Each structure stands twice: as C-alpha cells, then as structure tokens.
Image (cartoon, grey):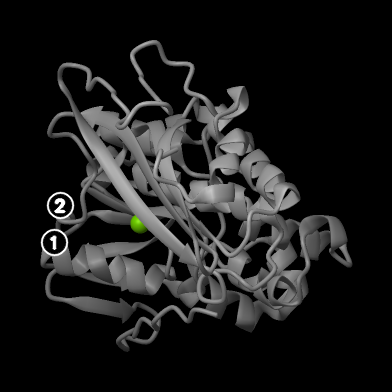
Amino acid sequence: MSETSLGEFDLIRDFFDRSELRSKRSDVVGIGDDCALLSVPEGFQLAQSLDTLVEGVHFPVDCDPFYLGYRSLAVNLSDLAAMGATPHSFTLGLTLPEADPKWLKAFSDGLAALAGQYDAGLIGGDTTKGPLTISIQAQGFVKSGKALRRNGAKVGDLIYVSGNLGDAGGALPDVLDGKIPETAQDKSSEYLLNRYFKPSPRVELGQWLVENGATSALDISDGVLGDLGHILKASGVGAELTIAYAPVSGALLEKVGSEQALKLALTGGDDYELCFTWPESRVKPLAEELAEICQLTCIGRIVEGSGLVDIATGEPLSPKAYRHF
Ligand SMILES: [Mg+2]
C-alpha cells in the first residue's frame, strides 16, 4: 500500500499485505516499494483491465464484505479470460468511509479466496477515506498478437456462449434484499446468489479459445444481446439468433418461470460468461475438447449487414441497456 495513506488507514495494509494475498511468483516485487515490478515473458503481451465498483451503484449498500471482495476480483479476471489472458496479479484502490477491522478482514478473505486459485497476488494499491468504492486493476499475459478481440467475427461464424445466462439477474431481488447464499430461503435461491456473488471467470475457456483460433470474444457483463452487439459493431457484421437456445439453469426456471428466465438470459447483467464466434468448419474439435471445460451453447450465426435478428420471427432484436442499482 502507498506510504501516503491517511492516519488509521495505514493500519489497513495489515489486512492486505498478508501471505494469502501475496504473489508467490519469484519475479514479482509487490507491496512495500513505491511501485510493483513484474516481468513480461518474451513473446507475450501484458493484458490489463480496470473496474471500479461504487456502493449503491454497482453493489447494494451494506453488501457482505467477503462476497464483495470475491466478486470485485472475479469481474476483473473475467475480462482477462475474455481476451484469453492468463491472470498474473492485481492492484487495489480502496476508498472507505471508516477502517472497520471486521469488514476489512472479511473483504480481504474474499479477495484471497479467488486470488489463490490463479496465483494472482495483490501487488500494490492505495487506500483513502470516502464513500465505499473499490477499484481493481488486474493484469495477465497473452501470447503476442493472439488475444481474443471483438473485431474478428466473420460472416458464417457460429456464435457460442458458455455456461447458463440470466442467473445473476435472477438473484437480484434477493441481493437487494440483503441476502447472501448462506441466508437464501431455498436451494434455487442459494444457487442464483452464488452465481451473482461468485461468478466463475472462464479463464481456462479463454486460454483454449486463444490456442485454437476463436475469431472474437468478450465477457457478458451487460446481457448477451447488448454485449454481442459490441462484437457485431467492431467486426462490421450482423447476427441471426435463435433466442430459444439461450441456455438457462433449472434454478432460474424454477425461480422466475420460462418467460422471465429467457428475458433475463438475453438482457440481464453480471453473468460473466463468455460469448465468442467460431468458424463453422472447425466445430468438431470445439465440441469434443471443450466439453471437459464447460457447457457451451450455439445460439446463432454471424451474417452480413448489422444488428441482431430473431431467426424465428425475422424481427430485429433490440438489446436493452443494463440497469444499475
Ligand atoms: Mg468485459
């Protein structure tokens, strides 16, 4: 943490400069100097992503600190996964109204729970006093020139999504009600709350897609219709979708019914699954090798033109903007 931290906030470093969060990598200089130092391996590029989460805007007031820590890091690792990068480390900018040791311990435990899975250590940051705001910058490495970008989708490519969609949106009423998985009223609600608070960054999938030549990819943070629109725009193409193929979980169906589940799958936010395009001529290895990593569903195809069309009706599909709290 920075030496310029204010008063009691110097204490905060105790919660973050701890072995569970420290990078185990030998080539890293982390917390303690004015800058962190890391080496980019030859033949790789540094991939960086920054997300800022503000209380009352991106997460509810009085959110559980453990889950807040976990989720704040997960959304950044998801961006690395979307580019096919391997996570390396992260820095943290934390603005807090007060230094509450219990809150800080739980928050850093949440960060550590996910960071340890990828050996993505905390290598620096800063703390200040103010309204609760969490900024995390995560970095990783990807082979030079190979990163998955949004501008490579080609006419004829198939469009895939990982996992199930809409779960995080289905959890929102419970999230706003202050629920966490441990206080869910039933199994379906518990599953959805876990999907909201502990999204799985699709790191392994992103790495496979880089190695095997996906033409474009991104992570779904604002609903697949809106996010796929970014690929279409960047690639100068359109898409036909079979919206009935949008994959939804049994828990979401049980909780909200099929009509609302489909709506959440298409336009709900915070899923952090990957959406990518793939040449149809190479579908066989995709289906065979990726079955081990995660569920994949083909929801449509890239076509000439622009925008999204519903194959069933021939009507344009308009992506809805993600609504913050
Ligand atoms: Mg993203």
Taking 107 as reference, is 152 left or right? left
The circle on residue 152 is 2
Q: Is residue 85 above or below residue 199?
A: above
The answer, for residue 5, to whether it is visible in the render is yes
Whereabouts is ligand 1, in terms of quadrant? bottom left
Q: Position of residue 136 (x, y in %)?
A: 42, 49
Taking 95 as reference, is 190 left or right? right
Q: Position of residue 59 (x, y in %)?
A: 58, 69
Amino acid at dot 1: Ser
Q: Is residue 48 above or below residue 45?
A: below
The circle on residue 235 is 1
Q: Are marks 2 and 1 in contact (CB under 8 Å)?
A: yes
Residue under the image location 41 percent in, 68 percent down: 224
The answer, for residue 199, to whether it is visible in the render is no
Q: Position of residue 293 (x, y in %)?
A: 51, 34
Spatial CA distance of label 2 from label 1 is 6 Å
Residue 295 vs residue 188, the one in the foreground: 188
Taking 220 as reference, is 216 left or right? left
- Counting residues from the start of the chain, the first of labels 2 and 1 encountered is 2
Report the quarter where the C terminus lies: bottom right
Report the quarter where the N terminus lies: top left
